[in-house]
Image (tube, rainbow, N blue to C red):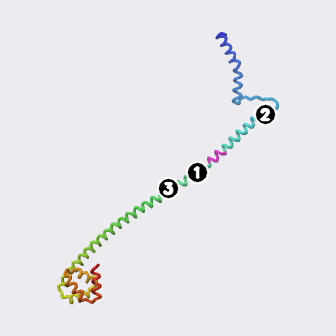
Amino acid sequence: MKTRDMIIVGAVVVILSFPLMYLVMLLATGNAKLVFKGDLSRAVEVGTMTRVQRSSQHRDSLIVENTYLFMANVEEGERLVVERERLLREQERLNFLITELQSEREKLEAERQRFEKVIDLTEQSRAQGVTANARRATDLARVYQAMKPKEAAQILETLTDTQAADILRAMTDDRQKARILSAMETERAASLSQRMKN
């Protein structure tokens, strides 16, 4: 066959097959339907109705499911709004507490500094008092060392144990110290000797 003959045969086949292809397209898209007489047409009609019904039920179930999802999303959104408001209130309360805590910390720091100053002043006063007492005890020790032991013992017995022990401790002459203690009552001398050890 020649090329020209083949083109003619192809054109005839296309022209003759076009109505058949057009009918298949119409049937496939649902724009046309074949109607049969008898049981076959009823079976096709029932099948079509069943497909439509299944499609409708599926669509209805999707609508119901989407409705539930939408309602759940709305409830979750409302819950999140309430939770956000609660968290904002809690944040405000915490900010207030932080501010109060910082204020209290500043007050405590000021009080601590004031307390340290008082302690320093107390320590200085005590150190000065100890130095002054030691100086007084040294001066008195010189005086009592120069006195007769019996007279010094009589005067020391009128003082408190602490004062008498400080004066005796400040004496440089151990013999004079021993003579004064021997001139005192035994119990008082023992008590003063014990204090002088400490």
Image marks 3 and 1: residues in contact by CB distance under 8 Å: no
Q: Nearer the viewer, residue 188 or 44?
A: 188
- The majority secondary structure of the magenta stretch comes to helix
79 over 106 or under it: above or below: above
Quadrant for residue 51, please give it. Answer: top right
89 over 137 or under it: above or below: above
Q: Is residue 50 left or right of residue 136?
A: right
Q: Please tell me the numbered disc located at residue 59.
A: none
Q: Which residue is mark 1?
A: 76
Q: CA distance from mark 2 to mark 1?
A: 49 Å
Query: Is 148 inside the magenta-drawn segment?
Result: no
Q: Nearer the viewer, residue 122 or 63?
A: 122
Residue 90 at x, y = what percent? 49, 58
Q: Please tell me the numbered disc located at residue 43.
A: 2
Number of other residues with Cα within 10 Å of mark 2, as a class: few under 14, some 14 to 19, many 20 or more: few
In the rendered structure, which disc, 2 or 3, sits on the residue that comes first in sequence?
2
In the rendered structure, which disc, 2 or 1, sits on the residue that comes first in sequence?
2
* Secondary structure at numbered mark 1: helix
Query: Mark 2: which amino acid?
Result: Ala
Q: Which residues are magenta?
A: 64-70
Q: Residue at x 80, y 31 (%)?
A: 40
Query: Mark 3: which amino acid?
Result: Leu
Q: Residue at x 57, y 50 (%)?
A: 77
Q: CA distance from mark 3 to mark 1?
A: 18 Å
Q: Which residue is mark 3?
A: 88
